[in-house]
Amino acid sequence: MTVVAREAKFHIGQVVRHRFHPFRGVIFDVDPEFANTEEWWQAIPEDIRPRKDQPYYHLFAENTETTYIAYVSEQNLLPDETGHPVRHPLVAEHFAELSDGTYRRKAEHDTH
């Protein structure tokens, strides 16, 4: 059986939101397919457990209470169309201004 790598639907710097859970975030890394632990994957209730054969995204995430790092399957993400900045403290370390729903990555020589 041949496995064809899927093109990621979302990109680094893009602001996205979870399809079902009340959080949003900025993508800072993409795995072409599931690359977390089996225990992590098994901890997701089976009826909502995403497939492994799709891109997974690392997010600087936020909800109404806190900020954190999230790991989310492509099938569970949607573009965030609010235009609001993400308040996660690591966003400013890795990205510059927000424009049209995407943060521009800081160049190596950019300073704070």
Image: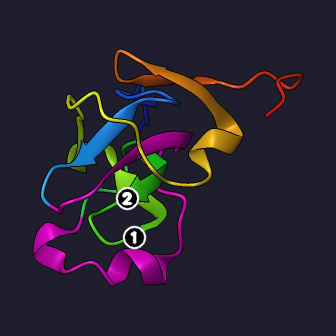
Residue at disc 1, secondary structure: loop
The C terminus appears in which quarter of the rendering? top right
Colouring mode (rainbow / by chain / secondary structure / one colour): rainbow
Q: Which disc number belongs to residue 66?
A: 1
Magenta range: 21-49
Name the residue: 34% across, 26% down.
9
Q: Nearer the viewer, residue 16 or 57?
A: 16
Check disc 2 and report its element: helix, strand or loop. Answer: strand
- Percent position (x, y) of residue 62? 37, 59
For label 2, the residue is 62
Position of residue 78 in the picture relative to residue 112 (left or right): left
Q: Position of residue 43 (x, y in %)?
A: 33, 84
Q: Quadrant of the N terminus?
A: top left
Seen from the viewer's position, the closer of residues 108 and 111 is 111
Mark 2–mark 1 Cα distance, whole angstroms, equals: 6 Å
Can residue 31 be seen from the camera position used here? no
Q: Amino acid at mark 2?
A: Glu
Q: Nearer the viewer, residue 77 or 26?
A: 26
Percent coordinates x, y for residue 68 in the rendering: 48, 66
Number of numbered callouts drawn: 2
Please give left or right for residue 2 compared with residue 101 in the image. Answer: right
> Relative to 52, is 110 above or below?
above
Residue at screen point 55% across, 22% down? 97
